[in-house]
Image (cartoon, rainbow, N blue to C red):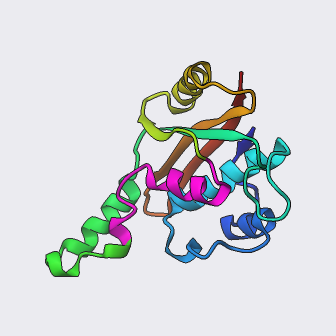
Amino acid sequence: MAQDNTPGVSREEQAKKLLGALPERWGRMDMMSRSALVEVGQVLHDAGLLAETNAALQPGWTSGLIVGSRRGSLASDLEYAETVKDGPGMASPHLFSYTLPNIALAEAAIQYQLTGPAFVLMSEQPFEDAVQEAVYWLSELQGGNTIMVAGALDVIPGPDGDAITAKFKLVQS
């Protein structure tokens, strides 16, 4: 099970180590997306499911991604709201794309070529509920090489920086 906050190692360094280089979209990603990209990749890497050549899910596997969150995209929503204070013409189109909590999952799904279900559950028990939902989806999906990555993901804005929760695990039937 991967969990965030490797002491002394930035998300950027983790991504470079995992992927060989930063993805092209890294610079525009919010913290939730960066965290999802690194942590989902780490779970797949630890399970030996990433192709060595392109850091994507190995051929022949189908995987979905289910995340539980207490706050969804709140950090990006607040940041976006700040850009609107001086009028709608000042609203940031860059930030707007990250005001949906499932965008972080889309970034990870694109990178790792995950083609199964991907969605966010809003929950007070985000990790537990995401794992439970992953177990349900596995029972519904047909195929021997089907896995789900499930976990909790939250970015909590604070005066001393954002607090990040990113905890994922691989769920198999």
Rendered-image quadrant of the N terminus: top right
Viewer-proximal residue among 144 and 153? 144
Disc count in the image?
0
What residue do we see at 43% from left, 63% from top? Answer: 159
Quadrant of the frame with the C terminus: top right
Is 124 left, or right, of 111 in this rendering? left
Does residue 172 sit above or below 54 in this rendering?
above
Question: Residue 170: where, in percent of width, then height?
Answer: 71, 35
In the image, residue 36 sits, relative to residue 25, either above or below, namely above
Compared across the picture, whether 35 is left or right of 57 comes to left
Residue extent of the magenta highlight: 95-114
Q: Is residue 83 left or right of residue 136?
A: left
Magenta residues, dominant SS class: helix
Please tell me whether residue 99 belongs to the stretch shown in magenta.
Answer: yes
Q: Tell me residue 142's x, y (percent).
A: 63, 24
Q: Is residue 143 left or right of residue 109?
A: right
Percent of width and height locating residue 32: 51, 56
Q: Residue at x 54, y 30 (%)?
A: 130
Q: Position of residue 59 (x, y in %)?
A: 77, 48
Residue at 67% x, 64% y is 11
Which quadrant of the figure has residue 122? top left
